[in-house]
Image: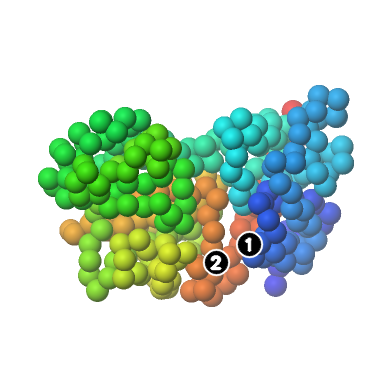
Amino acid sequence: MPDKGLADRSVGLRIAVAVDKVDWHAREIARAMSPLGARAIPFRLSTARFDTSAPFGLNIRGFASGLPDAVIVRSISGGTFQAVTMRLGILHALRELGVLVWNDARAIERCVDKSTTTFLLDRAGLPTPATWAVESMNAARGIVRREAQRGPLVLKPLFGSQGRGLQLIRTAEELPSAETTAGVYYLQRFVGVERDGFRDLRILVSRGRVVAAMVRHADSWITNVKQGGRPVATVPDAQVKALAIAAAGVVGAELAGVDIIRDADGRPFVLEVNSMPAWRGLQEVTSFNIAGLIVRDLLAALEPNARRREAM
């Protein structure tokens, strides 16, 4: 049953949902909003426009001359550097106008660029595998020759998700061409351990607390559910919970999927922080509706945000 007080405060709210397409996640969000009286309105950031003749300097499809009460960013379409910069600029502008954006452009920028995520995690003293990011193949080869003596490295796309494009590197000769890596080599110490397959943790953090978690179990060292990993229900211990919450806080994400792996000694390391996390696999092993929790958290955060908008 929805919280009556929250439902009373949410009637008539219009929540923009930034999507590539109206997928399962977008439909789940819309279904979760309906009993609370709020309306989810999907839109593509590629259709939003800066327009200084408009009342707020923006034109967002589905909102005429007004603004949404909040925005949930499910995805940002790929595109040229200029196009993606402008889409992030729309999110920056919405935040400047006092609109609650989950997650805002600052958090997305910090998470989409894995090198920035790693830098911030390490600077905050959070355990994360040793990492190097360079634009030179010669520099990357030098790193592999030096570091692979202690074990393999993982080459990851700087911008990437769902386990696509990962490669285990044991020798410098295994490094692909710069054209294949878009000119950037992001290399991370491989800390996975084979124990009847490979495992890592996906922890979902919302508003500074752990709300759901799963183990991803796979025969391969790539454990993402989209790549064949099997979700298994789990209850994370206090150490993992604290680490996930801290990692989300470091990048400034209100909603985050934090990937954590244990090394051979059982020590947890943060691999990535996802600012636009999918949760379909996690939902399979979670007893409550995750979209409903996300929506309730967003709507609960709107009240203090509304007061800030009124003060602008």
Say above or below: 94 vs 292.
above
Point out the image quarter for the N terminus: bottom right
Distance (Cα) linking label 1 and label 2: 8 Å
Residue positioned most to the left: 149
Residue drawn at x 62%, y 52% is 74
Answer with left or right where residue 6 lies relative to residue 185.
Answer: right
Residue drawn at x 33%, y 35% is 133
Q: Mark 1 touching mark 2, by CB under 8 A?
A: yes
Residue type of the residue flagged with mark 1:
His
Callout 1: helix, strand or loop?
Answer: helix
Q: Position of residue 52 (x, y in %)?
A: 81, 24
Residue drawn at x 61%, y 58% is 294
Q: Position of residue 273 (x, y in %)?
A: 44, 48
CA neighbours of label 1 inside 10 A, class few (<14), some (14 to 19), many (20+) = some
Say above or below: 204 vs 67.
below
Residue type of the residue flagged with mark 2:
Arg
Asked whether residue 120 appears in the rendered view, the answer is no
Residue drawn at x 87%, y 41% is 64
Q: Position of residue 37 (x, y in %)?
A: 80, 61
Q: Which residue is mark 2?
A: 280
Q: Which residue is mark 1?
A: 25
Answer with left or right where residue 294 lies relative to residue 163.
Answer: right
Callout 2: helix, strand or loop?
Answer: helix
- Which residue is nearer to you in this view: 3 or 197? 197
CA neighbours of label 2 inside 10 A, class few (<14), some (14 to 19), many (20+) = some
Q: Position of residue 230 (x, y in %)?
A: 41, 72
Point out the image quarter for the C terminus: top right
